[in-house]
Amino acid sequence: MRPFFPCQVLNETEIQKIHAGALSILARTGLRVEHDGLRDPLAAFGAQCDSAERVRFPEPLVERFLADSDRLDYATVTPRVGGGVGVSLGLYLDPETDTHVPWQEETLLGYIKLAGLLEYVGRVGIQVNPVGPPRVTQPLEARILAWKYNTGLGGCIQRTELCPYLLDMYGIMADATGKAATEIEVPHVYMVSPLVIPRAVAEQVLFFREHGIRVNISNMISAGGSGPVTLAGSIALNVAERIALGILGRALHGSRSWTLRCNISPLDMRTMSHPYGRPEQILANLAMAQLARHYEVPFNPHCGHSDAKRPSVEAGMQKIFSAWPCILTGRASIMAGRLAGDAVYSPIQMILDNELIGAVRGTLRGFEVNDDTLALDVIDRVGPGGFFTADEHTALNFRDAQWQPVIWSREAAQAWLNDGRKIDAEKALEIWHELMAQPDPEPRIDDKTEERLRAVVARAASAIGG
């Protein structure tokens, strides 16, 4: 038994309407592509380009693209949940004082250390260096931290002027690791929804393409902001943008695959904030999961976030509320430690999320149905009115049959009342103290390599401005 099911939230008529809507957007509205270095390959692929930088995709071109794309066999997909620990600009929620404070180098390294010691959350992914005032070189500095402490990379570029310096850094890391520069990182940029690939993004893509490095382009839609307030409209727009990016990837790199990502969440009409823990995000993800099966392509949802500003019931509920439907359809991440969307980072929340991810993985493993697990002989041996706790079968199987919590309550109320009355966040604080007492991780790059990398950052700061 495995808890995994194909999503069936759209009927066939609704699927066809969304598909037809996406085709209409691509053929009639098109994209504004602000650089001929991207327009020319699209034109050679069959797109229609005009003098106003507009690129339109005729329906036969789109249908040919879809028909020629690689197919994902969903019968081979195993449901899984990841534990993303992304760090970007924002505030650190200090466990000792419970106050939101700016990042310091020490707290950032402690956050990285904590993620490495927890069982389920995985590595930190650093977008930019969040320490200190804003400066042009933060994306370069983030890479030094990531390479030094073996974290993941968000891969953001931000400014085209940084591209040559990034390339120099890839060369330095290639020397240090014995890898090719093209293996060091996959940079990442975002188009501007709706339907614009800005000149700066195009310049970054083209710069690295000249050096054999592919840059991933993604999109993000706020329903009521950069997309229609109605979910059907934002979903159709998202499908259109994802297809257009797939066509661009094929025109530039010959890519045979494309992915349906879903970064749709509502724009709050009262505050103009962009919340991530709302029902609309779940509905959009469910619809896009079904559409991914329709197109037979991978699905990558945006979920597992919370808008809460500190660890709370709101935080845990929003994370599992938004992630669980995606988990059961195949894939999701719970963003461990992140709060307020991506503006607050809490070690206590990371530890609580680690427990949550462990429980989810305990659910996803399902259970086996066979002669041993049916335990018919055991039931017969224990008999009517018996008790299974002392039976050898229980001793042999309980560790595999039951998930074992670390933080979640497992004692009766009276035992809890007699033993400190600690709630989950208090237990998490104790765990944090224990883990922070362990040795810090050893740097993964030597002093000479770090010195060379920091020299590149200094040159960038001097040439562009710090």
Image: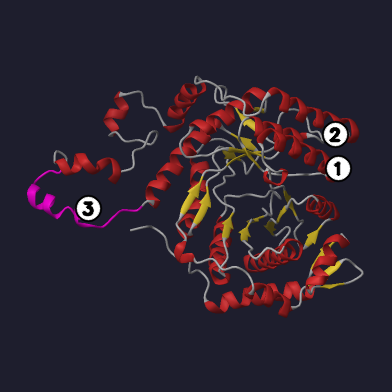
Q: Earlier in the sequence, mark 1 or mark 3?
A: 1
Mark drawn on residue 161: 1
Residue type at mark 3: give it.
Answer: Thr
In the drawing, what numbered circle is on residue 190? none
As displayed, is residue 396 above or below residue 70?
above
Using residue 327 as the reference point, say whether residue 419 is left or right of it. left
SS category of the residue bearing label 3: helix
Mark 2 and mark 1: span between their CA atoms? 8 Å
Disc 3 to disc 2, C-alpha distance: 63 Å
Q: How many marks?
A: 3
Q: Are marks 2 and 1 in contact (CB under 8 Å)?
A: yes
In front: 291, or 463?
463
Pointer 3 or 2: first along the chain: 3
Could you tell me which secondary element the residue under label 2 belongs to? helix
Quadrant housing residue 229: bottom right
Q: Which residue is mark 2?
A: 460
Which image quadrant for residue 300? bottom right
**For the residue carrying disc 3, how many other residues have a C-alpha within 10 Å: few (<14), some (14-19), or many (20+)?**
few
Return the disc, 2 or 1, that comes first in the chain's sequence.
1
- Is residue 260 found left or right of 380 in the rendered image? right
Q: Position of residue 69 (x, y in %)?
A: 63, 70
Residue 182 appears in the figure: yes
> In the image, what residue occupies the spot 56% across and 51% down?
303
Q: Which residue matches tag 3?
A: 373
Highlighted range, magenta:
366-388
Q: Is residue 404 above or below residue 28?
A: above
Q: Between residues 440 and 192, which one lies in front from this camera angle?
A: 440
